[in-house]
Image: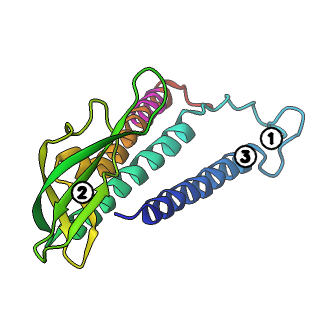
Amino acid sequence: MRIEYVVALIAAIVIVDVVILIALLRKKRARRTSPGTTAATGTQLGTKPQPKTSAAPVLARVFLTLGVSLAIAAGFCAVFVAHDNTGDSHADGTVVELVPSGRGSSPRYRARVEFTTEAGTQIRFLSPVSSNPPPANVGEHVDIRYDANNPHDAQINTYWQVWFLPTLIGIISAPFLLVGSGFGIVSRAGSKRSPEIA
């Protein structure tokens, strides 16, 4: 899957989530400053003061929206990857070099792999995903999947090399869904405990 598609997908998710967040905040602010409400006390004239509302419902919606959006993005990304891999050709490749791509005490490595297509063309490519430990050792033979129409669009045929991006987005979505669910449970429990105002 091309990086431009991924960037466009994540940008669309962020824009949609920001719009939803702004709409939720405006809605909450409108409820607080409804007509007949005094600016100083925030209460309507001739009525008892309302209890302070919790931020949990808004946070629940925000985190759940982000989590669901990222989960949907992971699903779309998985569909794109599966579609791109449909009809791929396979070849036996050889790792000729490990290229460091990270800094610090534990650098990550990308494998430079060489293989020959069914048409007899020799191709050399750099794996798009870096890892530590490296995806393979120098001289090791690895299974390669590539697009027959564009042999340079190739990758090592392992789970993390092929499905890294949808898996990463899915993992990122999980904490948002968990936190959003937690805020949702807290807001429901709080609404059940809060006494009704006469």
Specify the segment rendered in magenta.
181-189
Q: Nearer the viewer, residue 56 or 46?
A: 56
Which residue is drawn at the image coordinates 58% and 59% (left, top)? 15
Asked if 196 appears above or below 116 in the picture, the reply is above
Crowding around mark 1 (Cα neighbors within 10 Å: few <14, some 14 to 19, many 20+) is some
Whether residue 26 sits left or right of residue 92 in the image: it is right
Inter-mark Cα distance, 3 to 2: 51 Å
Circle 2 sits in a helix, a strand or a loop, which is it?
strand
Q: Earlier in the sequence, mark 3 or mark 2?
A: 3
Tag on residue 186? none
Residue 114 in the image: state x and y as whole percent: 22, 56
Inter-mark Cα distance, 1 to 2: 65 Å
Instruction: Say which quadrant the C terminus sits in.
Output: top right
Residues at discs 3 and 2 in contact (Cβ within 8 Å): no
Which residue is drawn at the image coordinates 41% and 50% (left, top)? 70
Q: Nearer the observer, disc 3 or disc 2?
A: 2
- Look at mark 1 in the image and give the residue it sits on: 44
Q: The disc labelled 2 sits on which kind of residue?
A: Gln
Whether residue 139 sits left or right of residue 9 in the image: it is left
Which residue is drawn at the image coordinates 49% and 59% (left, top)? 7
Q: The disc labelled 1 sits on which kind of residue?
A: Gln
- Look at mark 2 in the image and give the residue it sits on: 155
- Look at mark 3 in the image and give the residue it sits on: 29
Whether residue 12 sits left or right of residue 42 in the image: it is left
Residue 68 in the image: state x and y as whole percent: 39, 50
Does residue 21 belong to the magenta stretch? Answer: no
